[in-house]
Amino acid sequence: MTGDRTAPELALRVLQQLWQGGVRDVVLAPGSRSAPFALTLDAADRGGDLRLHVRIDERSAGFLALGLATGSRRPVAVVTTSGTAVGNLLPAVMEAHHTGRRLVVVSADRPDRLRGTGANQTTDQAGIFGTFAPCHDLTAALPSEDLELLVAQACSRRGPTHLNVQLDGDLMPSDPDPDTWWHRPEALQSHDSSAPAEVLRRQESSPGVAGSSGVEASVTIPTDGELLTLGPRTVVVAGDDAGPAARLLAEAAGWPLVAEPTSGARVGRQALRTGRLLLTTDLRDDVERVVVVGHPTLSRPVTSLISDPGLEVLSVRGRDGVATDPGRVARVLEVVPRVDGPDDPAWFAAWRDADDRLSALIDAGLAAPQGDPARPPGDAGLSPLAVAAVVGAAVAADTSLVVGSSNPVRDLDVMAAPWPPHEHRFVVGNRGLAGIDGMVSTAVGVALGRPRATRSIAYLGDLTFLHDTNGLLMGRGQRRPALTFVVLSDDGGAIFSTLEQGDRRYAGAFERVFATPHGTDLEALCAAHHTAYERVDDLERLAAALAESPSGTRVLEVPVSRADRRAEAAWLRELARQVRQPRAARP
């Protein structure tokens, strides 16, 4: 059946093929044009074949789908109606593009004959996401084998895909019996002769992507990487989504590992807690080679290192097909390289000694009594760094942690001790573009996508939290995860105070155009969303709360001051100087 398909039949066929491609979670932002999808999804959810998540805000819906894809390692679809609803998905599509997440956008559309006529809610949806997602304009006349191939490609390719579905005629099913709206298709076998050959080839050739199951391998360790020579003093930099291969390379060679919290590599004996601070000392001057894995974005010292034309820089291509090389100086590798034995242990020993001593200085300063000169600058309130240390320590085995951009992830980068290996921690964030968009919804999606995690935590700043409070809008009957939000609440954008605009010369305009104090009552906001709330004013209570197992979603607001953030950053640099003086300053 091709041209004779009704709108409900076309919607059913698309959803069946998504199921064949491994989709098990679908997020729906309801609308009129998407009615055939909505009814079919409701029936599929009631039948236990798909999990349907309904959200009223398309932007939050897109990031919920992104979080589900991140947590479940499966392709996830988000379904919208026509018009501006589709455009609201752009931020999530951009993030999925830059992180290689398998997000499938299914947008209901008017038929082509109504485009350009001024018909209600009709616009040029096909190709709306431009270079960020390939688009397939699906019609009732599309041959079945072409439809199967296009949907299979959307489920298997890295990154987002847009399926724009033209629905014509009567949108409602002819039979009002819900049992007729959905039926599960025959499971696609990896060598089923009825499956298009091209579909099977794509599934089998996609690295890290399972065939018909749709589940991406959690760990991929290459064995055919380039063999590196030993001798050059080498540092491994692991950025977002680097994975364990970066750690294994550093361990095999005995090299220092500077691993960001969301790298998946901040684990084991080679990982440094204060690596980015040590890159401001004489140790950085002795580096001769850098291996970059993943997408490092957190600090200028790291960016400076991997952009240095005087070094040998090797950058491994990431999930999105891009090798991080901001200075355009790197030689690009397809997979993580390997070594045939350990390098000179003295090289790592110098880094380990400096890391241990600097970590001890930071911890001692945070623990010092008020008025002690060893303390970081600030009032008697909680230190944001101390809060990050408690959050990092709460990430036990089988824990999921979603970290917001801005200060929380950077605080964690200084304070989180490397975690023990083989304990299945899952620390992620939206670091593809490092925006604050949709982080509440992303965290909810990750928690729902990893239901077997012993604990799920999200660590966000207050502006990041407020930017997506619609992520808390979950109607009756919707799945609510056991998820704890730790909101570092400093009434504004503290990160800007550590940048150039935080200099006192710009103080007159700073509060209004950068800090943006909001004065929002988070307790009242949580009450409006029927979300549990607690204000936490001491570290012991925070640690105890994070050790609990909540039955639903809750918010822990941790008030801190942002007045001394710039001075705090200078304090960290000074401690690093005390441990290792920059070469130019040494006698």
Image (spheres, rainbow, N blue to C red):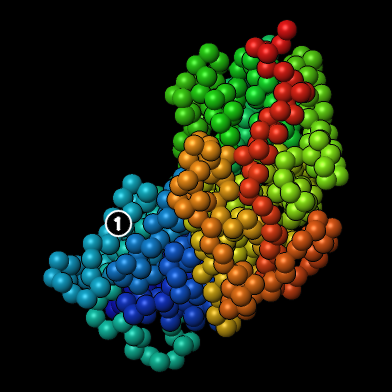
Compared across the picture, whether 166 is left or right of 372 comes to left
Residue 93 x, y percent position in the rendering = 42, 54
> Is 66 or 373 nearer to us in this picture?
373
Direction left: furthest residue:
117
Residue 478 x, y percent position in the rendering = 58, 78
Q: Amino acid at mark 1?
A: Ile
Q: Residue at x 64, y 58 (%)?
A: 489
> Is 336 or 120 nearer to us in this picture?
120
Compared across the picture, whether 3 is left or right of 336 comes to left
Compared across the picture, whether 10 is left or right of 55 comes to left
Q: Residue at x 48, y 40 (%)?
A: 506
Q: Residue at x 65, y 19 (%)?
A: 284
Residue 580 x, y percent position in the rendering = 74, 20
Q: Kindly identify which residue carries mark 1.
A: 128
* Residue 75 seen anywhere in this rendered image of the structure: no
* Residue 582 vertical placement versus 375 (above, below): above
* Residue 427 seen anywhere in this rendered image of the structure: yes
The crowding category of the residue bearing disc 1, from other C-alpha atoms within 10 Å (few below 14, some 14 to 19, many at least 20), is some
